[in-house]
Every structure is written in structure tokens, then in C-alpha cells.
Amino acid sequence: TPTGTSAPPVDVSLSQLVMKDAQITMTGEGGKTLLSVRDVNLDSDVQLSGGKLSGSGRASIAKVGVAEKLFASAIATPIRFAGEEVKLTPLRGKLADGDVNADVVLRVLGGTKYSVKLDLRDADVAKLLQEAQTKPVMKGKLQVAASLEGTGGLATINGSGQANITGGTLAGVPLLDTLATLVQITELRNLQFSECRLEFTMANNQMPTPVIRLISPQVH
């Protein structure tokens, strides 16, 4: 290329891009697993012309693990390559026996950026805690609606959402056990509630919960 001129853009056309049963693992400090993806299958066509992407296809993932604590399965989605972005919408899957519905947009050219709109219905809270190897202090059905975006890891994520647990029980919580002893209300040791609602925001690597609401027929 002559001095002072840039190289012409490279055009690429793949009539079929196939991936079968791929395994992906991301590790952090000390070799701790941050993300594991099992049995990734992809079948698509993709073109890169004039610095823009085009094409479409489908993808499926048998199981995704986040920090070996959170596990989603049976993920399936159409894929659309458009301009600088890869769009996975609608993305469907399962999480703790609940239904995951999401729209995911990944910017892969011109700088990395992603956005996620998530809707989770009827996930089993007890199963979530069991899979996370956490003390099973709560039962109920979890609903989540969230909208998030970022450019990298957790520290870059901004967004907001709400979580709602219905038909639940709190048991084995030290604070509630102490209160039950102090105020002589034994029901607090096994507190049943109709709704536990949290509204949250994420920014600057923090997630405050400005709204927490718990409704229980045992507490008036």
C-alpha cells in the first residue's frame, strides 16, 4: 500500500459456518472457572463487506455455568448478523426449572459492547440456592425482569431491574430466629410470605436495592 493510503477493507463470505458440540471455558485468577459453556452448536452463514456484517443462522447451548454457581440449560436462539452487531433474539432457555426469555445484542466491530433484556419466569428458588451450594433458607417462585448493558466484565455493567418471589418461605435465617426469641413470635422461624419484591440498579460495580418489600400473612 502506498504511503499515506489505507488498505482496502477485506470482504469475507462464508456460505456455511458450522460448530458442533464445542466447549468453552473462561478462568480467572487462581484458575477459578468464571464461565463454562457446554455443547455449543452453530449453523449459519455470514458475510463481511465494507466493514459491515450480514447473515443469519441458529445456535443452541446445552448448559452454561457462571462462576460454578448459576446454571442455565437448553438454550436456543436464532442469530442475525447486522452491521456491527450480532443479535440473539429471541433467546430461550431454562434456569432452575424456570423459563428464560431474552434479547441479546453484541457489538463485535468498532469496539465491544453488549445489551441484554431478560425475563425469567417461575424459577425454583430452592433449586437456585442448591445449585449455588448456598444454605437453603428460602423457597418460592422467582420472577425477574432486567435490562443491562456493558462493555466487559461485571465492573462495566449498568442497568436496572426487579425480582419478585411469590408463595415463599424463609427458614433458618439467624436474624429471624433471634427476633422470634426476643418477641416470642415462633412463626418468624418459618416465615411464610406471599410476595418478596426487590428493585435494583447496577452501576460502578455496585448493586444497591433501593426497594425491598415483603408481604406475609403472619406479620401485620
Image: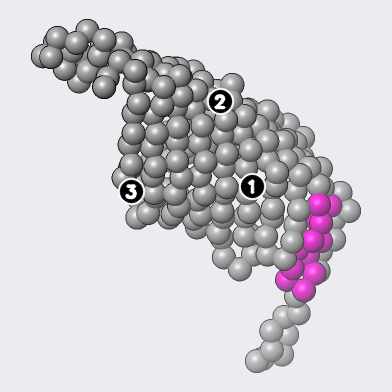
Residue under the point 35% across and 50% down:
205
Q: What element carries label 1?
A: strand
| Residue placed under numbered mark 2 in the picture | 122
Asked if residue 152 shows in the view, the reply is no
- Tag 2: residue type? Asp
* Quadrant of the image occupied by residue 214: top left
- Tag 3: residue type? Gln
Do the residues under discs 2 and 1 have CB atoms within 8 angstroms? no
The disc, 3 or 1, on the residue closer to the chain's N-terminal end is 1
Residue under the point 35% across and 26% down:
215
Q: Mark 2 or mark 3: which is in front?
A: 2
Can you name the residue that lies furthest to the right here?
15
Q: In which quarter of the image is the N terminus?
A: bottom right
Q: Mark 2 or mark 1: which is in front?
A: 2
Q: In this view of the protein, which residue sits in the foreground, 25 or 68?
A: 68
Does the magenta segment cover residue 36? Answer: no
Residue under the point 68% across and 41% down:
91
- Tag 1: residue type? Asp
* Side of 172 where 4 appears, left or right: right
| Residue placed under numbered mark 1 in the picture | 103
Q: Give the range drawn in magenta.
A: 45-56
The disc, 2 or 1, on the residue closer to the chain's N-terminal end is 1
The residue carrying pointer 2 sits among few (fewer than 14), some (14 to 19) or many (20 or more) residues within 10 Å by Cα, namely some
Q: Quadrant of the C terminus?
A: top left
Label disc, if present, on residue 206 of the rendered structure: 3
Residue 26 vertical position relative to residue 5 in the rendered view, above or below: above
Residue under the point 37% across and 54% down:
203
The x, y position of residue 140, in whole percent, is 46, 19
